[in-house]
Amino acid sequence: MAPSKDRRPGYSRRAQYGIFTRYVVAVFGVFVGFGLLALSLTDPGAFSFARGTAAEAARPIGEANAVARSTGQDFFSAIAGYFQAGQQNAELRREVEAARANALTMKALEDENRRLKALVGVIEADRKPVAAARLIGSTGTSMRRFALLSAGARQGVRVGQPVRATTGLIGRVLDVWPSTSRVLLVTDPDNVVPVRRASDGLPAMVTGGSDGTIMIRLINTGVALVRPGDVFLTSGSGGLYPPGIPVAVAVKTTRDGAVARLAADPSEAEFVVVEPVFQPAAEQDQQAEDAAEAAKARVP
Amino acid sequence: MVAQRITSTSDTRRSAKHAINRAPSPLIAGGVPWVSVMLASLITYSPVIASAPVLPPLAFMLFVAWRMLRPGLLPVWAGLPLGAFDDLYSGQPLGSGVILWSLTMLAMELIDERFLWRGFLQDWLAGAAIFAVYLLVGAGFAGLASGHLAFTPVLPQLLLTIALYPAVVWLVALLDGLRLTRFRSF
């Protein structure tokens, strides 16, 4: 490639100054970048408005892609279905028999549970989901794990609400805009979920590794070992996540816990459900925090 | 009319005949690089909901490819607006793209000055170095924001990015051809 000639424009002062100004603006851009970075590191919510405008503008693209994703999955699973129909039929019949027996046991347990709870005097509010929506995008090029949700303030979504798929926890709402919102996925290193082991209630924390895996860290190390295959559910402590949502399945035991995989793969969920914050106290804390942040944002 | 119909059947003649009264639109000729990079920033809205950094930074690759293939088409300061736009969608802390894209443009000026006559292989090497710095420093910025520094998850993404670069250059070359499509002026 030949060297470009536009760097030496001849004797024209105007052209020379023009080129000089371009370099000045380019260097200025680097400094602006550092300023913006410092601001967004000290105050993560600082540019929420700009992000929101951008997300709202690109929402239709995400919606269309989300539909394409689910139809694509349907298409391939439909083809695969023809090859396995007979075997699957037999398997499913066996499973239904087993499930029917299980359901009866569950029903009895549920009744017993209700009676015992009434006896102790625990009143449980009926939690209705806030909204059902599609995941319309995710930050696939970055080390941070955010996803965009096709529901926002208009659908009743608020900051801090947990987001789940049918098979498990997806994350929690981080930013809310009129008809989109941003979700911090469980796989983000910044997300810490208090969990307990399904079998015996062993308490632990789940944090993201940002490479698709998640880490289970036991709170009391040395007491028990996590075995591969152990299922961990949200414990409800902290008040943000309601108890009993599957989060992780242990894969490999480590010194202080285990490496795990997600119970619910966000890419497989066609719809996710936004649930209300488990304990209103946590919500109030969150709201106070939001109000403080909003007040900070208002003062330039 | 008849003459037109005849020439439209023969492809080689057509371009020469139609060149009269037809000119590339300056808006499209200048705007295609900007629009293509901005559209690639929307890769966030791809159908994949990623649990790891698996997608190549397509917008940045297009940006570098435009700069290498057509120096001077994107001005030196183009990293400021395009990087900021990418930051809005990429999930990186805002400012990370502005810094890295602006520095890339300045670095490309240096590369142009040092290595005057280059082939595609040298461009690919320079691109590989730029992508390595971009992804690793970007991971560093993201680590500062989340409080957990990690670089290993970036490595597969980096390999994919370097391997895909020729395809992106091919795409940019294609767009560069379309950029100068001649339109009939009214």
Image (spheres, coloured by chain):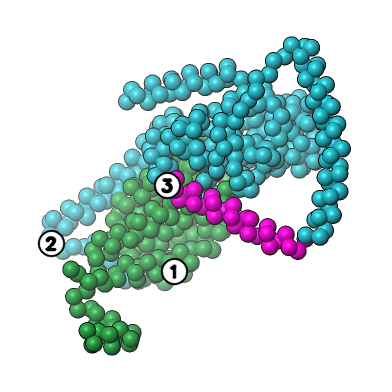
Chain colours: A cyan, B green
**In the drawing, what numbered circle is on residue A138?**
none
Look at the image and say whether residue B181 sits in the magenta stretch.
no
Q: How many marks?
A: 3
Mark 1 vs mark 3, foreground winner is: 3
Q: Magenta region: which residues? A: A58-84
Mark 3, residue position: A58
Q: Is residue B143 left or right of residue A238?
A: left
Q: Secondary structure at mark 1?
A: helix
**In the drawing, what numbered circle is on residue A11?**
2
Query: B29 above or below B79?
Result: below
Taking depth in this image into account, of A49 and A23 the one nearest to the observer is: A49
Q: Are marks 3 and 2 in contact (CB under 8 Å)?
A: no
Chain where mark 2 sits: A
Q: Is residue B121 among the parts visible in the rendering?
A: yes
Q: Quadrant of residue A195?
A: top right
Look at the image and say whether residue A65 sits in the magenta stretch.
yes
Q: Residues within 10 Å of mark 3 (few under 14, many from 20)?
A: some
Q: Is residue A34 among the parts visible in the rendering?
A: no
| Badge 2 amino acid | Tyr
Q: Residue at x 38, y 22 (%)?
A: A296
Q: Quadrant of residue A84?
A: bottom right
Q: Quadrant of residue A261?
A: top right
| Badge 3 amino acid | Ala
Q: Position of residue B150 (x, y in %)?
A: 58, 42
Compute the Cα span from label 2 to label 1: 37 Å
Mark 1, residue position: B170
Q: Residue at x 44, y 45 (%)?
A: A59
